[in-house]
Amino acid sequence: MTKDVSVRNLTFNTLEHVLNNKAYSNLAINQVLNQYDLSVRDKSLFTELVYGTLKRKLTLEYHLKPFLKTKVKRWVRILLWMSIYQLYYLDKIPAHAVINEAVEIAKRHGGHHQSKIVNGILRTMTRTGLSSLEDIKDDNKRLSVTYSVPLWIVKHWVTHHGFATTERIAQAMLENPGQTVRVNTAKTTVERVSKLLNERGFQVKLDQDIPECLHVVGGSIIQEPVFTDGLVSIQDKSSMFVARYLDLENDNRVLDTCSAPGGKACHIAELLNHTGKVTATDIHEHKINLIEHNIAKLGLDNIDALQHDATQSYQGTYDRILVDAPCSGLGVLRHKPEIKYEQSQVRINTLVDLQLEILNNVKSHLKPGGKLVYSTCTIEQLENENVIYTFLKQNKDFEFDPIEDPRTHQKVKTLQILPQDFNSDGFFITRIRRKDS
Ligand SMILES: C[S@@+](CC[C@H](N)C(=O)[O-])C[C@H]1O[C@@H](n2cnc3c(N)ncnc32)[C@H](O)[C@@H]1O
């Protein structure tokens, strides 16, 4: 990155990094926030500009297209997307400031000729205005452009969830996620953490469904002692349901097969409250450090992390197994919006094969009567219901072990949480049981 620390320049560099080098937006954003000493206002503007542009990329491109008379370079397009986002989605920035900054970035990046192109396009656009999205006749296409979701994903969602629900999903995916934390109940209490956060000026609300989940408003808690001292972890509410549905009992031996960076594995260890043993594995050696870092920070004494490929045989048997499977991630678009532009049907088919391979490998490591939770952070039926029904069809010694749907309090075989349900990530959770022999 260049040394220019203007917010627009940092935004432009970060967008290029994410869109061209396939960096994760949340990690790229955190890297900049840690590297540069920005004011609170600039931090929030930077985050808003990066996420906003990524989330709305297809809409911004649709609006840009009529103004492109010749082919423009990829970086010019990125600069124009972020400028259009500021012009039409943020009301506090005057148009002349947006255009001047874009022209300056273009000049530095590509010289006078490129800056003239950028200036011309943005000035014409502000003079003539944008075309209406309502003019798009085809319903799916209109939904795709309006909410910036690739058409093939819209078609999948419409098939599985219906048009009205798909529109609510797409809308909810554009919203900013709230901040939820998981209290480390192996070390402290919800009351104590709430008090500590209140004293530091945060507003704290207890969650209605998960006792250790707190909704925290008033800024990021990343530099707060409650976080750095391991009294809380940052985790989305949907993801916290997963460990809870393992129906843990003290002294359980638990295998978490795909566990990096260890969010759910550590939650399980906390719920076991210094009893039992969690074995947390992941295929990637370098990610084991992330799990170990979390274990040490949280002060957990009943969990080990080790490298292991979940498609290969494990040693021993377990009371509980979690398969939090590698998946398309289409439920977490509020945290990682770029995912929607990178996935494909072909990739989903490969993931489905891997998900089934993992389940078929770990099944013999579950004790008779033991419980297995299969979860994903996607809302793609092929990776969710289809996988678990296929597995059960092929494995008659397993059966559904219904869980309570937190929305209806009815028992269900499979639970698909949508982002609009709890203003949280889209998640799929199901629990199966190995029949007693
Ligand atoms: C959805 S993430 C897990 C998130 C984690 N459970 C948590 O709560 O923090 C899926 C993980 O599966 C891992 N993975 C992918 N293929 C795997 C395999 N064959 N065996 C084990 N882990 C695998 C990835 O490295 C990734 O960390």
Image (spheres, rainbow, N blue to C red):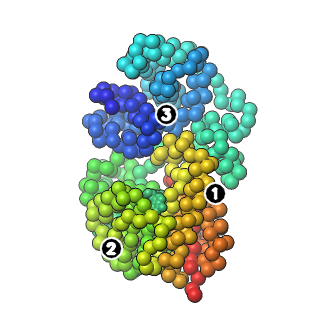
Mark before the other along the chain sequence, 2 or 3: 3
22 to 250, vertically: above or below: above
Mark before the other along the chain sequence, 2 or 1: 2
Instruction: Give the spatial CA distance, label 2 vs label 1.
Output: 35 Å
Residue 7 location, x and y as percent? Answer: 36, 29
Task: Quickly name the residue at label 2.
Answer: 302
Task: Quickly name the residue at label 3.
Answer: 53
Q: Can residue 229 be seen in this view?
A: yes
Residue 401 appears in which quarter of the rendering? Answer: bottom right
Instruction: Give the spatial CA distance, label 2 vs label 3.
Output: 43 Å
- Determine crowd level at label 3: few under 14, some 14-19, many 20+ residues with C-alpha closer than 10 A: many
Disc 3 residue: CB within 8 Å of ligand 1: no
Relative to 325, 299 lies left or right: left
The tag on residue 331 is none
Residue 402 location, x and y as percent? Answer: 60, 73
Q: Residue at x 57, y 67 (%)?
A: 430
- Residue 277 vs residue 203, the one in the foreground: 277
The tag on residue 382 is 1
Residue 56 location, x and y as percent? Answer: 54, 35
Residue 278 location, x and y as percent? Answer: 38, 72
Q: Which quadrant is the N terminus positioned in? A: top left
- CB of mark 2 within 8 Å of CB of mark 3? no
- Looking at this view, name the residue that lies furthest to the bottom: 437
Q: Is mark 1 on a helix, strand or loop?
A: helix
Mark before the other along the chain sequence, 3 or 1: 3
- Residue 233 vs residue 370, the one in the foreground: 370
Tell me the amino acid under the disc marked 2.
Asn
Tell me the amino acid under the disc marked 3.
Thr
Q: What element carries label 3?
A: helix
Tell me the amino acid under the disc marked 1.
Leu
